[in-house]
Image (cartoon, rainbow, N blue to C red):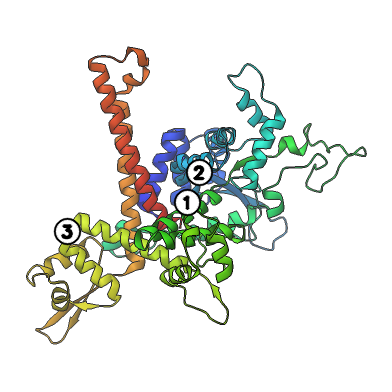
């Protein structure tokens, strides 16, 4: 689900990080879909060398993936074509780098944080490049074994992975329209349906689980596992496989962890600490079996197994097995006497969280009456007539049509007109969740773009303050510096909070 404001925000992030030339190439890929080098040169009106360099930067930072396919006919001499696809999700993940680093800082040591920070900052790196970067600014060079051990720790928890195939072969191109023809009213949230293409290419590029999260052994070498007669690594272009292997941060695992955290915190706020502890214990004990980020249900577990996992936590040790059973029912798990197996509907937990987020937006933007109306229609899930809505929500009948009309105008409600005769008709209203979710997501991207632009404006306005040594910041300058710092903290925290909502609607 890529909206027009989502594309604008992604282009803004790339512009901020890599400049206008690179963002121009990226923007064309985001708007037009997969393109060859020749078409990129044509559409961007840049030189071939500029486009090549821009693509190298985008690939280095995991924002673009190359792939090849046949022309699709049976004629002799048909050649393979190389195209490039922008990875929208990976571009937006750049906003979340501080969150990724925070996760690692809570679980592992500072050296692992530093190694991951280098991968997030510099993109794809070999082990030797990691060692060189770790040694910068230090009197004694960092040992390769030391960096390799930290890399091994990150691989064990899947925070780092081997880079995918640089140019996978896709059996046939999937050409999709970059826009859908929609009514004028919904054009503002036009969706670019390119997810299937990205997924197809990335599925072809991803390595097998056994290779993806493992270090090359001393006797490992090329793709066939060949070694020299004495058991030493086979040399490829002057380097062993261990030295030539490229590594990158595994965004998928970080999003999976953030999803778990969002699920647990929503349950804690909506139900209680006990239900949150139980959900946390279930997700923690089954995380190795969790293959997908958007897993719809938790792995089924027996009550005894769940109770054993819950007892491992400090809060859980205060709970009885009856309390655990009651909390499981709270979480929507039916009691299964025969199977004694419980599985939590994670998709439903997220749906409730999304509903709460939209209701919160309606309350802040339109007031309490609109909130009650929207909440009624959201729970009803069907068309309701204006007067019935007013009666059910205790809203004045003269005010209800105005509120409903405003929510409809802003794409928060769906409206249908029912004609009973040539002179009499009724207006019916409902919440169309699929359309509404796209609209809300697009609004969030727009808000994120505005926050980012405001941060850039504030930085540019007081840019000279950033070049003044801290010991020279005194008097009136100190006041300006404090203002800039406070504004940055406020805007930055607002953007991170907004990003939590973005992930809830797009990534989870």
Residue at disc 2, secondary structure: helix
Residue 393 in view, yes or no: yes
Q: Nearer the viewer, residue 503 or 48?
A: 503
Q: Is residue 258 above or below residue 307?
A: above
User: Which of the two labelled residues, at mark 2 and mark 3, occupies the earlier sequence position?
Assistant: 2
Read off the residue under disc 2. 103
Residue 208 appears in the rendering: no
* Crowd around label 1: few <14 · some 14–19 · many ≥20 (10 Å): many
Label 3 crowding class (10 Å Cα cut-off): few <14, some 14-19, many 20+? few
- Point out the tag, 2 or 1, that comes first from the N-terminus: 2
Q: Marks 3 and 1, Cα distance to the nearest angstrom?
A: 31 Å
Identified at 52% across, 63% down, the residue is: 295
In the drawing, does residue 504 fall left or right of residue 299? left
Q: CA distance from mark 2 to mark 1?
A: 9 Å
> Furthest residue to the bottom?
421
On-image quarter of the N terminus: bottom left
Q: Residues within 10 Å of mark 2 (few under 14, many from 20)?
A: some
Which residue is label 1 attached to? 258
Q: Secondary structure at mark 3?
A: loop
């Amino acid at each position: 689900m890529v909206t027009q404001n989502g594309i604008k925000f992604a282009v803004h992030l790339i512009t901020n990080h890599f400049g206008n030339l690179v963002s121009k190439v990226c923007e064309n890929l985001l708007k037009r879909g997969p393109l060859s080098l020749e078409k990129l040169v044509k559409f961007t009106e840049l030189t071939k060398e500029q486009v090549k360099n821009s693509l190298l930067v985008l690939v280095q930072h995991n924002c673009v993936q190359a792939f090849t396919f046949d022309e699709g006919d049976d004629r002799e001499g048909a050649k393979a074509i190389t195209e490039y696809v922008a990875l929208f999700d990976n571009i937006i993940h750049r906003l979340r780098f501080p969150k990724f680093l925070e996760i690692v800082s809570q679980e592992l040591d500072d050296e692992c944080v530093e190694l991951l920070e280098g991968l997030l900052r510099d993109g794809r790196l070999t082990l030797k490049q990691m060692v060189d970067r770790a040694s910068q600014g230090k009197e004694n060079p960092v040992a390769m074994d030391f960096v390799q051990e930290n890399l091994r720790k990150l691989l064990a928890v899947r925070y780092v992975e081997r880079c995918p195939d640089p140019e996978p072969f896709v059996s046939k191109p999937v050409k999709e329209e970059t826009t859908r023809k929609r009514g004028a009213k919904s054009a503002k949230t036009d969706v670019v349906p390119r997810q299937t293409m990205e997924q197809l290419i990335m599925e072809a590029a991803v390595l097998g689980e056994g290779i993806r999260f493992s270090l090359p052994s001393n006797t490992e070498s090329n793709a066939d596992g060949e070694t020299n007669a004495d058991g030493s690594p086979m040399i490829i272009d002057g380097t062993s496989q261990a030295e030539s292997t490229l590594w990158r941060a595994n965004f998928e695992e970080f999003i999976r962890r953030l999803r778990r955290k969002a699920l647990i915190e929503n349950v804690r706020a909506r139900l209680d600490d006990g239900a949150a502890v139980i959900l946390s214990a279930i997700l923690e004990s089954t995380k190795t079996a969790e293959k997908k980020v958007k897993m719809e249900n938790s792995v089924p577990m027996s009550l005894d197994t769940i109770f054993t996992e819950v007892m491992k936590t400090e809060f859980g040790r205060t709970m009885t097995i009856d309390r655990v059973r009651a909390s499981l029912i709270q979480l929507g798990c039916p009691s299964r006497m025969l199977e004694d197996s419980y599985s939590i509907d994670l998709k439903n937990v997220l749906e409730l969280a999304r509903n709460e987020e939209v209701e919160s937006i309606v309350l802040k933007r339109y007031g309490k009456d609109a909130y009650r109306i929207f909440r009624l229609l959201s729970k009803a899930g069907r068309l309701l007539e204006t007067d019935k809505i007013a009666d059910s929500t205790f809203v004045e009948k003269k005010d209800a049509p105005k509120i409903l009309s405003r929510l409809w105008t802003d794409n928060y409600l769906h409206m249908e007109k029912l004609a009973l005769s040539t002179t009499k008709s009724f207006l019916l209203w409902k919440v169309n969740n699929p359309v509404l979710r796209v609209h809300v997501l697009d609004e969030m991207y727009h808000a994120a773009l505005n926050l980012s632009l405001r941060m850039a404006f504030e930085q540019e306005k007081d840019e000279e303050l950033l070049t003044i040594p801290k010991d020279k910041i005194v008097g009136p300058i100190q006041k300006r510096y404090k203002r800039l710092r406070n504004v940055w903290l406020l805007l930055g925290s607002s953007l991170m909070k907004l990003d939590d909502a973005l992930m809830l609607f797009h990534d989870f």
